[in-house]
Image (cartoon, helix red, strand yellow):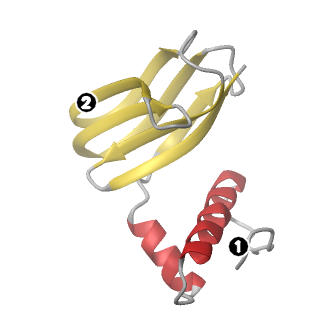
Amino acid sequence: IKGGDIVECAPDDSEKKKKRLIRKEIEIAEENELGTTSESINSEMNSNTLEIADIDLFPNPSNGTIRLRFQIDNQEETRVRVLDVVGRSLYEKSLVDFEGTFDEEIILNGKGLGTLMLVISQGRKSFIENIIVN
């Protein structure tokens, strides 16, 4: 797979998940000189992807204030972060032994414009979503 190649996904995958998988497959394939198959790439990605139910992130694009809601079924320390393009933390919240529903307004006014990354982590698993701030 090379940048610009089209990768077909199962029709029942969500659109966001397809875009993340395609983007990650291309990144890994470009970095991997050994020619790893996409089956092993998908297996590696899925083992490090945090499963989150019922995630809502709105509005996105935003003027700087967003509402984040999600459900996690595994009780474990959970970190919610928003990072800028160079990896600086603009928002961070650590939740000890968290399980259940997270519902919070995140205010990013004056902290950065453009594309930011929402990162939700438990242990070695993470969920990543882009946030656009105008």
User: Counting other residues with Cα less than 10 Å from the Cα at mark 1, is it few (<14), some (14-19), or many (20 or more)?
Assistant: few
In the rendered image, the quadrant that contains the N terminus is: bottom right
Per the rendering, the mark at residue 101 is none
Residue sitting nearer the eye, 87 or 7: 87
Residue found farthest to the top: 110
Distance (Cα) linking label 2 and label 1: 34 Å
Residue sitting nearer the eye, 76 or 88: 88
Q: Earlier in the sequence, mark 2 or mark 1?
A: 1
User: Counting other residues with Cα less than 10 Å from the Cα at mark 2, is it few (<14), some (14-19), or many (20 or more)?
Assistant: few
Q: Residue at x 39, y 68 (%)?
A: 47
Answer with left or right where residue 69 lies relative to residue 38: left
Q: How far across and how far down the image is residue 37, in percent?
A: 57, 88
Q: How far across and how far down the image is residue 26, in percent?
A: 65, 70
128, above or below 49, in the image: above
User: Which residue position holds label 2?
Assistant: 95
User: Which residue position holds label 1?
Assistant: 10
Local SS, label 1: loop
Amino acid marked by disc 1: Ala
Local SS, label 2: strand
Choose mark 2 or mark 1, whichever is in front.
2
Amino acid marked by disc 2: Leu
Q: Residue at x 55, y 73 (%)?
A: 31
Quadrant in the rendering for residue 72: top left
